Amino acid sequence: MGRKRSVLSACLLLLVVLVIGAAVIWNAPTPYRSGGSLPGLARIDPPFGVRFYGVSALGRDSAWVVGDAGVVLHYDGTGWSRHDAGTTLQLNAVCAVDPSHVWVVGSRGFAALFDGRSWRAVPTGVDRELTAVSALDPEHVWAVGWGGIVLFFDGERWSTERLDVAVLRGVHVVDRTEVWAVGDSGLLYRYDGDRWARRPSGTDMELTAVAAAPGAPQAVGLEGTILTVDGTSARVTRDGNTTFRGVARRGDSRWAVGFSKPLWMHRESLVLKASGDGPWLTVPAPEGLYPTAISVADDGSVFVAGLGGVCVAR
C-alpha cells in the first residue's frame, strides 16, 4: 500500500513539473517584436480541405496554391477555381512566371507546366521527391529535391545534376548567373552561370527555404533558424521553438513563415516581417493556419499558404 502511494506521489509530482515547465515555455517571451501596427492576414480559404505546401502570386487578383492529392487552385481576387494538372501525387511547390507559364513540382519527380489554357506534364527523368521550383523566365527554370537533385529547364527539356547533400529543400533564381539552393545540414549553394559551389552558412541546421536579392540570400529552417547572407558574411539567429517553412522578399521587405513546435497538441502560427536591416516583427495570423509557404507579388500583395488554409494580407 505504501509503495503504491509512493508511486502515485511520484507521478503527481512529475505531472506538476511538466505543467509548470509547459507554462514557462508557453509564456516565454517571443524573440520577435510585436508588429501590432502591421495589417493582419485575412482568410480566403478554398472550398477544398487539403493541406497546402506551395504558393505563388502574380498580383492581388492572381495567385496559385498547390498541395495534397495533386490539388492546384487559382485565386482571381474574388474566388477559387480548381485546375487538373494531371496527377494525384502530392505537389510541393508552384512558381508562376506570368499567366502563361506556371510550374508545379512534387512527388516522384513530377513536373507540369500551365500555358494559360491547359496543363501538360513535362518529364524530368527522375523519380525522387521534388521540393521547390523557381523560374526567371520560360527558358530558365530550376527545381531541386531529394538526393541532392538539381533540375534545369531550358524551354525544351530538363537536364539533371546532383549536389553533395541528401536533400535540397529550397531554390531561388535571381538572374542567369545567380541561383541559390539550400538543404539539409545548413548547406547553402550558389550557381554562378557555370557551376554550383558551396557557400558558408554558419549553421548545420536544416534549411527549408530561400529567397534572394542580388548577392544576399535569406534562408530559414528548423529550430527557428534565420540565415542572412550579405556579401561574404553570414549571420544566423535562432529561437529554438519554430519550424520555419517559407521565406520571401520583395524590395526592402523580408518575410518568414512557420509554426511552433507542438505543445499539448497545440501549434502557434508565426508570420514575420522585416524592413531593411530592421527587426523581425510578428504579423497577426489566423488560428490554425500553420504556414508552409509565402509569396509576395510585384504589387506588394502577400499570400500565405498553410496546412490549415490560405490567407492574404489586406
Image (cartoon, rainbow, N blue to C red):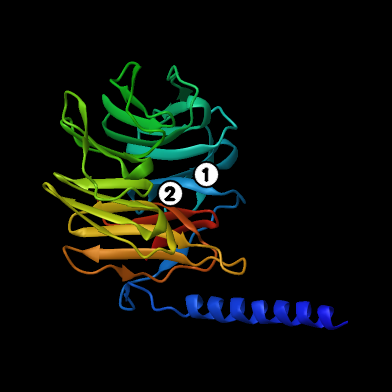
Label 1 residue SS = strand
Residue 76: mark in rendering = 2
Q: Quadrant of residue 71?
A: top right
Q: Is residue 216 left or right of residue 20?
A: left
Image position of 70 (left or right of 248): right
Establish if 192 lies above or below 8.
above
- Structural crowding at the residue carrying mark 1, measured as other residues with C-alpha within 10 Å and reported as few (<14), some (14–19) or many (≥20): few
Q: Going by the image, does 178 lie left or right of 142? A: left
Q: Which residue position holds label 1?
A: 81
Disc 2 vs disc 1: Cβ atoms closer than 8 Å?
yes
Q: Which residue appears farthest toward the left when viewing the image?
A: 231
On the image, the x and y values in percent for residue 185 come to 36, 43
In this view, 47 is above or below 198:
below
Q: Nearer the viewer, residue 111 or 39?
A: 111
Q: Nearer the viewer, residue 259 or 86?
A: 259
The residue shown at (88%, 82%) is 1
Residue visible at 18% across and 50% down?
229
Q: In the image, what residue type sits under mark 1? A: Ser
User: Is residue 267 visible in this depiction of the protein?
Assistant: yes
Residue sitting at 44 percent across and 45 percent down? 54
Q: Is residue 245 above or below residue 169?
A: below
Furthest-right residue in this view: 1
Please state which amino acid type lies under the numbered disc 2.
Asp
- Total numbered badges shown on the rendered structure: 2
Decide which of tag 2 and tag 1 comes sooner along the chain. Answer: 2
